[in-house]
Amino acid sequence: MKLLSFIVLIFSCITAFSQQKTALHYKIYNTTSRKMVTADDVVNDMAGADVLFFGEEHTDSVAHSLELMIFTKLLNRYPAKVALSMEMFETDCQPVLNEYLRGLIRESNLIKDARAWPNYADYRPLVEQAKIYGTSIIAANAPSRYINMVTRLGLGSLNQLDAVGKAWLPPLPIDTATGKYYEKFAAVMGGHASMDGMQLYQSQNLWDAAMAWSIAQYLKSHAGYKIFQVNGGFHSEEKLGAVTQLKKYDPQVRILNIASVSGTDITNPDWEKYVNLGDYVILTYE
């Protein structure tokens, strides 16, 4: 116990130093009040919620530091009742991730066998913090081979998988979100979302559904837990995508979402751009 306490202390010092480096490089706003708030305010707000989505820009180093800050505050505010869920790991890599968190395998094995992202260094502090605190990490994303398969062959191709393959996926068939989410996706794609028989959009929905299903299944067996979900912003902005899918799997789930955006209007936000993105918006700059 003394060793664990010492490790937690050292990691806390590292976290504090990281926070000092980013202290002048972000502001958090409550989009309802349009007033600046603190990370502690967000964490306290989780008393009435089950899942906190953090929608990031994958290359934003300030956002990565804030993820660690918020995750650490959640661990301290709700001890032994927090789990980390990550887009950055795929469901079939869950056993590898579990083995690493238990100290059974080396980090090099984790990086190789769990197919860690090229910028794993950005997410490593989250993983190490979870390991120190003995908390779970949910490998939430669908295996990339199945995302690619749907992009090429459509959602119907998933029915050809055997029971082992299907076990890594949400229940079939995967629902495709229509309306606003489709329109937003089409806009990002430059109006080409209908290409290849909608298969690209279908793979996006599989991506969202897998993360949502992974969270829903964890909550089902871990009542009272707080889930901190980290993903690319598009998956959770405006409470569309993975958030909408999660509400389908668990209609009673209580969700807060953060949209983290890098920009230049950090002190005078253009609310027309930001007000609908999330319950909270974090504006960052390098």
Image (spheres, grey):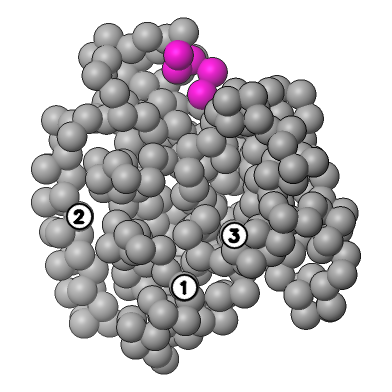
Residue 140 against residue 48 in the figure, above or below: below
Q: Does residue 223 show up? A: no
Q: Residue furthest front?
A: 196
Is the magenta region chiefly helix, strand or loop? loop
Numbered badge on residue 115: 1
Question: Which span of residues is magenta-colored?
Answer: 273-277
Residue occupying the point 32% across, 36% down: 39
What is the three-letter code of the residue carrying label 3?
Asn
Residue at which label 2 appears: 15
Where on the picture, by quarter, is residue 189? Answer: top right
Place of residue 220 in the rendered image (x, y in percent of width and height, measured from the top left): 72, 60
Whole-number angstrom distance, CA of label 2 to CA of label 3: 27 Å
Give the residue type that dot 2 points to: Thr
Q: Judge depth for marks 2 and 3 and give the one in front.
A: 3
In the rendered structure, which disc, 2 or 3, sits on the residue that comes first in sequence?
A: 2
Q: Which residue is mark 3?
A: 141
